[in-house]
Image: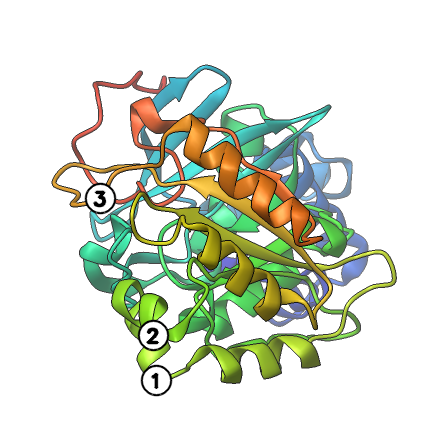
């Protein structure tokens, strides 16, 4: 088989030459045709049209397996879709409208082994990591099968991206290839619970790093260790040192995610401790109300409590944005992915 979803343009050209003995004048248009249009009717492609035998071989040989789209559900303008992989495991991806373009929240694993207590995916455990093709396939499906103009990609779906770093890095290289899906690196964000070895490695990615988001969710080691087991092995001071080493573009900042949970991390002293922790870093804090899942033990804060916490942070000179509550009715919000108890969805055609 001739792989394409997990290869950059140059890798595909090399594989094409080895398999068919043809140069870039043929393989490059093939790559662009598939990745930019989603089409595999090679008899219609000018570079291949006069080579009917090759066109037939390509339609047989090309390994284009982004998974089978089995469900779509929406909550307002947020849409979640479920992809069934070749081994019958399912992954979930979320399309979020952002001004004139769409952001796609992609999964990097089936499940997750980080065990964060507020996260539904974390309660699944890790079933397996995704291949680069399965990660890229989510963008391919969103663009070419669902018709969304995906320009931003955030690795904030199921799984811990830095626990599958080799495949995530390869997926980023494929996604950012200008001769293919052509997503600008400045529009890609990788979120992590704080795996510092992965953060340091991501900092050295090719010519420029991608945006980094850290799921912090607590102002102290005591609270963070309670809700995020990773903190017991990588405490907040170690994480902070790694974040301070991460290279930032001139106008960019680190993104910090803070899930606000009633009675856990929402008091004024928590806001002050959080501000002290963030002070040495250039950050943009996203304040996210906890999104309950079936069987959850916690509750989101009231609207008034969220307002107060936000005001406390502003008073401490923290750059903070409140994230809206979107997608919760179809279990598509932050921390809700990974279950099969959603309301019935629209099955795709074909």
SS under mark 1: loop
Residue 91, percent from left and from top:
32, 45
Residue 349, percent from left and from top:
36, 17
Q: Can residue 169 be seen in this view?
A: yes
Residue most extreme to the left: 295
Give the CA separation, mark 1 to mark 2. Answer: 6 Å
In the figure, 125 relative to 5: above or below?
below
Residue 15, percent from left and from top:
61, 68
Q: Which residue shows up at 22% across the image and 38% down it?
A: 293
Residue 233 numbered tag: 1
SS under mark 3: loop
Give the CA separation, mark 2 to mark 3. Answer: 20 Å
**Which tag is nearer the camera, tag 3 or tag 1?**
3
In the figure, 142 relative to 228: above or below?
above
Residue 298 numbered tag: 3
Residue 230 numbered tag: 2
Q: In which quarter of the image is the N terminus?
A: bottom left
**Do the residues bearing badges 2 and 3 touch, measured as CB atoms within 8 Å?**
no
Q: Which circle's residue, 3 or 1, is located before the other in the chain?
A: 1
């Amino acid at each position: 088989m001739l792989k394409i979803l997990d290869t950059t343009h140059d890798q595909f050209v090399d594989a094409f030459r080895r398999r068919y003995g043809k140069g870039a004048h043929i393989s490059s248009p093939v790559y662009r045709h598939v990745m930019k249009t989603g089409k595999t009717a090679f008899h219609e492609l000018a570079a291949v049209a006069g080579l009917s035998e090759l066109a037939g071989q390509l339609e047989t040989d090309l390994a284009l397996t982004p998974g089978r789209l089995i469900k779509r559900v929406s909550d307002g303008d947020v849409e979640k879709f479920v992809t069934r992989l070749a081994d019958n495991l399912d992954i979930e991806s979320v399309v979020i409208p952002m001004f004139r373009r769409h952001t796609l929240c992609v999964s990097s694993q089936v499940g997750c082994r980080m065990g964060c207590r507020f996260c539904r995916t974390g309660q699944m455990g890790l079933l397996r990591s995704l291949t680069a093709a399965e990660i890229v396939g989510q963008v391919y499906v969103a663009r070419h099968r669902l018709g969304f103009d995906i320009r931003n990609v955030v690795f904030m779906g199921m799984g811990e991206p830095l626990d599958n770093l080799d495949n995530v890095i390869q997926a980023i290289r494929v996604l950012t290839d200008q001769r293919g899906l052509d997503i600008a690196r400045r529009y890609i964000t990788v979120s992590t619970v704080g795996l510092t070895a992965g953060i340091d490695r991501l900092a050295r990615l090719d010519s420029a790093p991608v945006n980094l988001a850290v799921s912090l969710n607590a102002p102290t080691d005591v609270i963070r260790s309670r809700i995020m087991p990773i903190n017991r092995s990588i405490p907040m001071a170690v994480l902070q040192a790694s974040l301070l080493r991460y290279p930032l573009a001139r106008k960019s900042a680190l993104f910090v995610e803070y899930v606000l949970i009633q009675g856990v991390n929402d008091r004024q002293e928590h806001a002050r401790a959080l501000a002290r922790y963030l002070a040495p870093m250039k950050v943009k804090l996203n304040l996210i109300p906890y999104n309950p899942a079936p069987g959850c033990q916690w509750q989101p804060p009231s609207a008034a409590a969220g307002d107060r916490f936000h005001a406390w942070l502003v008073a401490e000179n923290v750059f903070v944005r409140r994230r809206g509550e979107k997608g919760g009715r179809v279990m598509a919000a932050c921390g809700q992915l990974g279950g099969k108890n959603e309301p019935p969805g629209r099955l795709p055609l074909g």
